[in-house]
Image (tube, grey):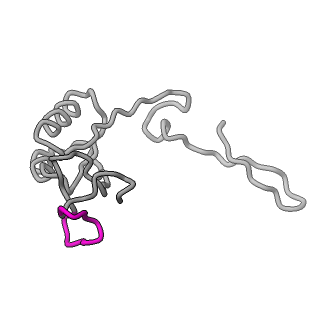
C-alpha cells in the first residue's frame, strides 16, 4: 500500500494515510506505467492544427496545448471537437519572420516590432 509519512504526536502511533496515484485515478493499477504524448504548439500554424487534431483523433496523441495568441489559434478553437486540449502559455515568439504578440494591449510584453520578444532572455 502506498502511503505518506505522518509525524506522530507525542504518545501516538505512527500511521500511513492511503495515497492514490495518478495512474489509479485514471483507472490503471498503481504499478502501471503511462505515456502521455502531448501535441505542442496547437494554433501556431494551419499545418500544426491539422497534425495535432489528426494525432488526437487517431489515438496517437493523448493531449494538446493551444497557444492562444498564435496566428492560427482561432482556427484551432473552431476545429475543436472535445479533445483533451490545455493552454500553452507563451511570452515569446522565437521565429524570425513568423511572429505574434499578446491578445490584449500590453506594451511591456512586446519588442520594438510590437510582437513578443524572440528569446527568453529578451523577455
Asked if residue 35 lies in the magenta stretch, the reply is: no
Q: Main secondary structure of the magenta part?
A: loop
Decide which of 69, 121 is in the foreground and name it. Answer: 121
Tell me where residue 35 appears, x and y as whole percent: 41, 29
Q: Is residue 27 left or right of residue 40?
A: right
Query: Residues in magenta?
Result: 102-113
Decide which of 113, 37 is in the foreground and name it. Answer: 113
Tell me where residue 55 appears, x and y as whole percent: 22, 30
Q: How many discs mark residues in the rendered view?
A: 0
Residue 8 location, quadrant: bottom right
Q: Is residue 17 above or below residue 59?
A: below
Tell me where residue 39 appears, x and y as whole percent: 27, 37
Q: Residue at x 90, y 59 (%)?
A: 11
Decide which of 45, 115 is in the foreground and name it. Answer: 115
Q: Is residue 85 above or below residue 61?
A: below
Q: Is residue 36 above or below residue 119?
A: above
Q: Residue at x 35, y 58 (%)?
A: 122
Amino acid at each position: 500500500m502506498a502511503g505518506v509519512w505522518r509525524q506522530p504526536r507525542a504518545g501516538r502511533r505512527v500511521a500511513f494515510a492511503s495515497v492514490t496515484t495518478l495512474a489509479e485515478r485514471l483507472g490503471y493499477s498503481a504499478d502501471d506505467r503511462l505515456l502521455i504524448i502531448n501535441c505542442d504548439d496547437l494554433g501556431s500554424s494551419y499545418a500544426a492544427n491539422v497534425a495535432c487534431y489528426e494525432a488526437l483523433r487517431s489515438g496517437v496523441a493523448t493531449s494538446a496545448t493551444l497557444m492562444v495568441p498564435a496566428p492560427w489559434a482561432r482556427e484551432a478553437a473552431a476545429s475543436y471537437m472535445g479533445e483533451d486540449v490545455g493552454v500553452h502559455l507563451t511570452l515569446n515568439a522565437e521565429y524570425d519572420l513568423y511572429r505574434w504578440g499578446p491578445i490584449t494591449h500590453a506594451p511591456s510584453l512586446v519588442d520594438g516590432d510590437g510582437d513578443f520578444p524572440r528569446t527568453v532572455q529578451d523577455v
